[in-house]
Amino acid sequence: MSDVIRLLPDSVANQIAAGEVIQRPASVVKELVENAVDAGATDIQVIIKDAGRTLIQVVDNGCGMSDTDARMAFERHATSKIERADDLFSLHTMGFRGEALASIAAVAQIDLRTMPKGAEVGTRIIINGSVVESQQPEACAPGSNMMVKNLFFNVPARRKFLKKDAVELSNIVREFERMSLVNPGLELTLIHNDGVMHKLMRSSLKQRICDLFGKSLEKQLIPVETGTSIVKIDGFVSRPEYARKRNQLQYLTVNGRHMRHPYFHKAILQCYETLIPSDEQPNYFLNFTVEPDTIDVNIHPTKNEIKFENEAAIWQILSAAVRESLGRFNAVPGIDFNVEDAPDIPVFNPNANGDHSVEIDVNYNPFAEPVPSAPAVSAIRSSAIGSDNSLRRTGTVQNWDKLYDGFMNAPEDMPVQSSKLNSADAAGGTVPMFGDDVTATDDATDDASSVQIKNRYIVTASISGMMVIDQYRAHVKVLYERYREQCNRGDIAPQQVLFPEVLHLSVAQNAVFDGISASLASAGFEFSFLGDNAWSITAVPSVMADANPADALLKIIDEAAYDTDTPVADVRDRIMLSMAKSAAVRKGSRLTRDEREHLISDLLKLPSPNYTPDGLPVIRIMSVEDIGRLFD
């Protein structure tokens, strides 16, 4: 039998490595900027063409490379960062694997000009798909000028599945923002298609945050600083009142390296647990400084996943530091003593004889034998809501109804008994028993064809047994199909808003918004650019006039930027789905029997009612056999 195992050529091995290291244009930007930082650069320019498809250029004023180093740098596992395995436990540089440049050269065309500081002439090297085409001396500025052209030109499948320019540019901007936060002492510039997106000067961390995300953040930030023998933590968290439902700015770094760490993220959220609603999250920008030998960054080629030796102890230190900062800066909301618009509640005043006065027998003994009822006591009992046999007061009562104004109208999230249930109870009749998990609605009768559970699910009979419907997802499905049909017919007309709302976007969000603005206009949105990544919303689709336009657009932008794997691929269909989610009945909303029947009818008329457009189940069926097994 002939030998079948062979050693792969370096070019093939580099392309395989590029599948993990270089996932998209943003990965190239990350690797090249990190190399510039490791080279000691103080001024770095990132120049992008066509969201990185055509050109990614990084120019720095670092130490530069000799002609030999420039050639060697593109060999696999060639690096100046480490020499032996023990160096992995004392890393002080961003890179160390020696895979990035080799992987980039395997899937792109490289043009590098570099010169060491103090040299009289530099070198230029041109590489095409791992093949060195030329290397020659050339006059250039000290530092390095790396141009990556036609990314994935020799990997058609990878290039084909790159996302739209707006999405890829958004990822580049976010990667640039992460590196800018890690290195506030550097001058950084981002240029796309000859337009400057970011130009950042050297600054403090707080100033860098404001330069990236807006001056309004300055008043929202609370400093966090603590130091122990295990870890030093410094940075900023936001005040609870500035928590966000979406677009949270949440950044964690360790030893100057950006990281993702769900465990520490949870520790921060627990500090805000009683301060903000459950559907909101705070902004935070925190840096951890630990001994290099207590962490392992060699988990994944992207180096964003990091393991800590003292993870549990750091969790406790982080939680205590954030809580201490929130308390020290009075971030816990106080009691509002503003009574300007407060309701007029009668207050007992023994010296007043006005409408709200009540005479109280100061000699009343609550443990004495009941005193025979008097006209005054009867008057009190008749005017108060619900008689109280322990009440023993004398005097007159007037305008007591004002005391209960506003209390009889329960909030939306508080269950309110219906008039039928109240009348049945008052008449001594029987009230249908549904148990703790079922909402007793005003049409909860024995002949009701559907029942609402916890104001979230609808239960009704089906041919095979029992059907359970998620009311929110069902409404999303119905509205999505309706909006999509109206959009295809051109029936969605814009409705002007009385007071235009201003939509403030980050640079990354604005890049996505530019890419989908034409689709938004065709869906019925109208807006105008105000400058500085701000837009004025002047009209919304008539089908979602009741939804908040700014929230709806932010949700659309988020889904366009992040949810790239959703089954809803077309941008216009994504917009229809976001509009449906914004206008659908909220979870926890009470539905009448007619509303439930109408929703069920509209849902079952659809060709495929079982799943939402993004693949979530809408209907679950329990057969009679399944129900019977519950009682076996």
Image (tube, rainbow, N blue to C red):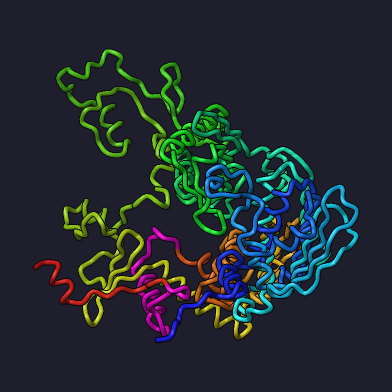
Give the residue at the far top of this rendering: 363
* Residue 501 pos. (x, y %): 68, 57
Res 438 quadrant in image:
bottom left
Res 70 quadrant in image:
bottom right
Look at the image and tell me whether residue 497 can be seen: no
Instruction: Tell me how many marks there are.
Output: 0
* Residue 421 pos. (x, y %): 26, 56
In the rendered structure, the answer to whether residue 291 lies left or right of residue 108 reads left
On screen, 230 above or below 454?
A: above
As for residue 70 lying within the magenta part, the answer is no
The C terminus appears in which quarter of the rendering?
A: bottom left
In the rendered structure, the answer to whether residue 186 lies left or right of residue 463 reads right
Q: Which of 448 and 347 is in front in this view?
A: 448
In the rendered structure, the answer to whether residue 98 lies left or right of residue 460 reads right
Give the residue at the far left of this rendering: 632
On screen, 347 above or below 151?
A: above
* Residue 116 pos. (x, y %): 82, 52
Q: Nearer the viewer, residue 77 or 616?
A: 77
Residue drawn at x 53%, y 49% is 85
As for residue 602 lying within the magenta part, the answer is yes
Look at the image and tell me whether residue 86 can be seen: yes
The N terminus appears in which quarter of the rendering?
A: bottom left
Q: Nearer the viewer, residue 428 or 598?
A: 598
Residue drawn at x 71%, y 55% is 33
On screen, 543 above or below 604?
A: above
Residue drawn at x 23%, y 54% is 436
Residue drawn at x 59%, y 56% is 97
Residues drawn in magenta: 586-615
By secondary structure, the bulk of the magenta-drawn segment is best described as: loop
Res 330 quadrant in image:
top right
